[in-house]
Image: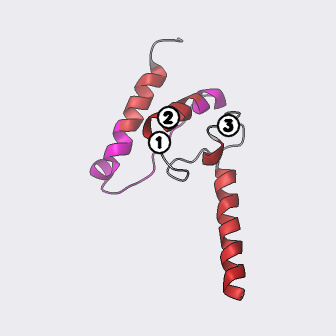
């Protein structure tokens, strides 16, 4: 039911895992978060972004149905495009 603290508790757990993942897993493995709807995932990730201030690439939003502009830098499509652009720029520089 709405208002019972699901997002709050999920964010607190994600925050705990994020800050202690090396201690828990022995390395900086990614954390997989799955939500029932795209809206719930966007709401969850938006709160995590506001609390943890990660840089794009630390968190990756898989799927293209996000409507939240705050999450746009974390979209996998956006990150892939940026990496392609960097590779093309590096290749152009090395060809000169």
Where is residue 92? Give x, y as percent: 72, 80
Position of residue 38 measured from the top left corner of the image (x, y, whole percent): 65, 31
Q: Where in the figure is residue 88, as x and y percent of width and height?
A: 71, 73
Q: Which residue is mark 2?
A: 50
Query: If you read the primary sequence from the N terminus, does the residue marked by circle 3 or circle 1 appear first?
Result: 1
Q: Does 25 lie within the magenta span?
A: yes
30 part of magenta stretch = yes
Color encoding of the figure: secondary structure
Mark 1 to mark 2 CA distance (whole Å): 6 Å
Q: Give the CA distance from mark 3 to mark 1.
A: 15 Å
Q: Taking 12 as reference, is 45 left or right?
A: right
Kindly identify the residue that appears in the image at 44 percent across and 30 percent down: 11
User: In terms of image quadrants, where is residue 2?
Assistant: top right
Q: Are marks 1 and 2 in contact (CB under 8 Å)?
A: yes
In the image, residue 92 above or below residue 78 = below
**Sequence-wise first label, 2 or 3:** 2
**Horizontally, is 6 left or right of 69 in the view?**
left
The number of numbered badges drawn on the structure is: 3
In the picture shown, does residue 46 fall above or below 28? above
Dot 1: what SS? loop
Measure the alpha-carbon separation of dots 2 and 3.
Answer: 13 Å
Q: Sort mark 2 into few (<14), some (14-19) or many (20+) by Cα contacts within 10 Å.
A: few
> Disc 3 marks which residue?
69
Dot 3, how many residues are within 10 Å of its Cα: few (below 14), some (14-19), or many (20+)?
Answer: few
Measured as percent of width and height from the top left, residue 45 is found at 54, 35
Residue of label 1: 53
Residue range of the region highlighted in magenta in the rendering: 16-42
The residue positioned 49% from the left and 34% from the top of the image is 50
Disc 2 on helix, strand or loop?
Answer: helix
Q: Quadrant of residue 51?
A: top left
Say left or right for 66 vs 59. right
């Amino acid at each position: 039911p709405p208002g019972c603290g699901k997002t709050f508790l999920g964010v607190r757990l994600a925050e705990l895992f994020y800050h202690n993942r090396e201690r828990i897993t022995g390395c900086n493995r990614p954390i997989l978060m799955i939500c029932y709807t795209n809206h719930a995932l966007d709401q969850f990730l938006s709160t995590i972004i506001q609390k943890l201030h990660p840089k794009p690439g630390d968190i990756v939003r898989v799927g293209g149905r996000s409507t939240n502009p705050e999450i746009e830098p974390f979209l996998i499509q956006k990150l892939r495009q940026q990496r392609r652009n960097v590779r093309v720029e590096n290749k152009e520089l090395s060809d000169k």
